[in-house]
Image: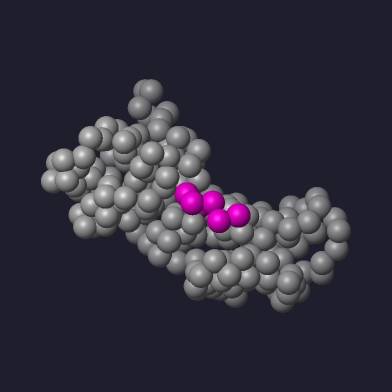
Amino acid sequence: MAEDIKMAKMAKTAKCACEAAFVGLYACSGGSNVGQMANRIAVELTKQGKGNIMCTVGIGGNVPGIMKSTEGTDEIIAIDGCPLICARRSLELAGFTVNKHIILTELGMQKNKELDLEGSEIKEMMTKVESAFDI
Amino acid sequence: MKIEILGTGCAKCKKTKEIVEQAVVELGVDAEVVKVEDINAALDYGVMITPAVVIDGDVKIAGKVPSLDKVKEWLAK
């Protein structure tokens, strides 16, 4: 029982590279509605088992464990809210190659300073992301 | 020297531990090799993909099995 609980915790945190391809999801998580949506999309894709949310800010901070974890990914998806593309720029500045790049404003979302997301908005953007990027 | 092998006990984690232990023996290094299966401990290092090797608190690799030569290089420093 204790072992089951431990294994369940593991599944929700770090992932083992023995699985199929390890897809890292790097959201900008910026201070706007699209930044928060980028984070939420990374969360939803992780819950669906389509990738693994990573700590994007750790790339900018050159945090060793996060850098090494990124080196260990098989595919990198950057999820940016707007054309400032902070997530992609951070990854590339650190020397990583971004395999897929999502920019939410290019999928029709208007950027503003609201931080609360509506359920319907999340659903709509998830559908657009899945469809446009074959995720 | 303290060497931590972070992982869930999967095949790659076991292989990583074997390689690290082999490197320690071949170089005759005085090191304690510890297998850490608590993945929350891995997250404390920022490690989000296993297996990972941490030497004296420094993350050397994550998500890959290191080569014997690479481990020896780390130990020699």
Q: Is residue A54 above or below residue A1?
A: below
Q: Residue at x 37, y 43 (%)?
A: B54
Q: Position of residue A34 (x, y in %)?
A: 75, 62
Q: Residue at x 66, y 54 (%)?
A: A40
Residue A5 seen: yes
Q: Position of residue B2 (x, y in %)?
A: 33, 35
Q: Position of residue B60 (x, y in %)?
A: 38, 51
Q: Is residue A124 above or below residue B1?
A: below
Q: Residue furthest left?
A: B26
Q: Nearer the viewer, residue B6 or A108?
A: B6
Magenta span? A61-66
Q: Quadrant of the N terminus of chain B?
A: top left
Q: Residue at x 36, y 47 (%)?
A: B52
Q: Residue furthest right?
A: A113
Q: Is residue B31 above or below residue A50?
A: above
Query: Is residue A86 rendered magenta in the image?
Result: no
Residue A56 position by quadrant: bottom right
Instruction: Say left or right for B45 vs B76.
Output: right
Q: Residue furthest front?
A: B77
Q: Position of residue B76 (x, y in %)?
A: 26, 50
Residue B32 position by quadrant: top left
Task: Give the color scheme: rainbow, by chain, secondary structure or one colour.
Answer: one colour
Q: Nearer the viewer, residue A59 or A103?
A: A59
Instruction: Say left or right for B73 vs B59.
Output: left
Instruction: Give the total of numbered labels.
Output: 0
Q: Residue at x 51, y 70 (%)?
A: A95
Residue A37 seen: no
